[in-house]
Amino acid sequence: MYKINLLLICIVLLFASCAQDQSKLLDPATSVITDKDVFASAQYADRFLTDCYGWILPVYATTGNNGTRWRGTDGMLEITTDNGSSNLNTNSGFGTFNTGAWTAASTGMFWGSDWTQGFQAIRALNLYLKNIDNVPVDPEYNFDESVRANRKAEAKFLLAWFYAELNKEFGGLPIVKDVFAVADNMKVPRSTFDETVAYITTLCDEAAAVLPISYPDDQLGRVTKGAALALKARTLLYAASPLWNNSAKPLDSPYRGKYDANKWKLAAQACKAVIDMGIYDLHPDLSNLFTTVTNKEIIFAHMMRPQCYMTMISVPYKLNKTGVGGKSGCNQVSYNMVKQYEILKNGVAYSIDDPASGYDPNDPFKNRDPRFYRDCMFNGSKFMGQTVSVGVAEAGAPKTPIHNCSEISPYYTYVYAVKFADLTYQISVDGRNPVNTPVNFANYPYIRYAEILLDYAEAMNEAYGPEVDGLGIGMTALQAVNKVRTRAAYVPGKQEYLGYAGSMPEIPSGLSKDAMRTKIHHERRVELTYEEHRFWDCRRWKEAPDEDILAQIPTYKADGTVQYPIQVIDHRPFDSKMYRMPIPESETFADPELKQNPGWNMSEETSED
């Protein structure tokens, strides 16, 4: 089926920093460390599991070629959606994807590496679970039977995580529970979609039954009971969604599950289990949500990333103290996304297309949803006492933008995604070397409570409608989405919020299920932008993203004014086969029984339509 080319997940590298007692194991004369060596020691076994955590892609930009989802670049997945753009669109991987030229044979795209690395991680975790019961108790290392049980539960969560990530990309998967030899060419067929979901949720349940609610500070980052329940909720929400739960194609297969409208209720119940824990809440301050290492909103996160590097690649480098790091402003926000941030006027939120909004196309960034000022840096915004000046200039313009990046391309939008940057300091040295820079450690949230509330709102609306408390917990779909929406408030004293006051108003009652669905989809797009949700939401909803990517480009005119014409900067064709990723061609050639997804070469279904 697929080739395993993993050498015990680079155990030698894993132990490179170990103490002298393992020097014999690393001696070339003794060959490489074996699994027997690893699981003879509680310390080594723990490091093995820690390395399995490391297989989760960090998303945050860091130094090194494996620093982001798109390895070797500083781009984030959003720039392959209608929310984002970048000079990195010229990169071969991004270019192939965004021009629609990608195929199952493409090797530079994320689904190829995700499939390979996902199953490598799955193999490692199966190896761990097979051997962890053989690890001797070690009182000196504080490894007893309760710790063993907890580590097994962590491994089950991680196994569920990697299957869930692959499941949302490909559908039904080969469920591999054994540990095949490194060079084996395994012949494991794809399970159906529902079988795969059942396997994931069972692992989540087994993990949640053992995992603690929290850990001491020196163990932050380990998975918790809440993380296991939240992953189950997300998985069931996806399983209930139109792509995977299609009444027009109601049979369970590798491509979609058996149609059952009750799946929305199951998803809502799973979200309820997280809410009922009573330990999570929305962080009150938008401005430091992602730079506060621990807060009640974070359920599962990639911990302790060097924030300085993320700030450097987010903020146009001429705004930094010494102008270092020409590699900056890598992730930008399209006008398609900018227009999603509503205008606040007299306590009412308006679309910019509503004449009552007072929207001024020549001063377009006034009075927007407070999340806009957290997420975006734009012409006229504030950073460390400076007024940001970016854009293009006509010949003869008396003033010109002074903060443009050095890597400008035709794909630039001049609205920079700074959601995860720390805007409280400037970088005085090259942020690509975080050893010598000021560092503010932060989280990248894989799952946070705002997502759970939005998941709950979506599932409840589909199962019961907008204002029916069908689960009896005192929260309707409308109430859940309004919790997230009204948290969005201008932060007093933060210069980037331009002195505005107030917060987003509630969505009013009285909406139909369809109208509420539209509101929930909009709220997810705004609240979760640049958190890798838009790409998958479009697919699971079977709602094609915009093909024309727009930018509202600040243009310094010869008459001294600045205008903001809107123009198409990219065209990204979309076909229904793109709702699912293609299984890498090398895998389907190796095993023709590994059925390809609809619409792709060698698929038994010629189209998703």
Image: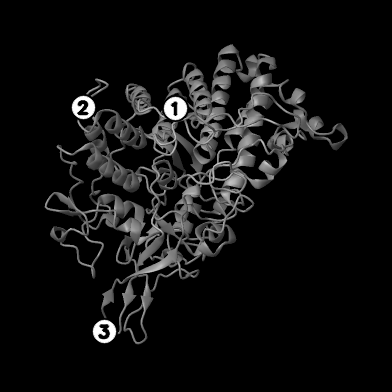
Distance in Å between CA atoms under marks 3 and 2: 57 Å
Residue at x 19% of width, y 31% of height: 467
Nearer the viewer's eye, disc 3 or disc 2? 2
Q: Mark 3: which amino acid?
A: Asp
| Left or right of residue 174, residue 385 in this image | left
Q: Which residue is mark 3?
A: 559
| Left or right of residue 398, residue 102 in this image | right
Q: Mark 2: which amino acid?
A: Val
Q: Which residue is mark 1?
A: 232
Sequence order check: which comes first, mark 1 or mark 3?
1
Figure check: 503 above or below 294 = below
Q: Quick one: label 3, few (<14), some, or many (20+) residues within 10 Å?
A: few
Quarter of image, res 226: top left
Q: Mark 1: which amino acid?
A: Lys
Residue at x 29% of width, y 58% of height: 339
Nearer the viewer's eye, disc 1 or disc 2? 2
Find out whether the residues at labels 3 and 2 contact each other: C-beta distance under 8 Å. no
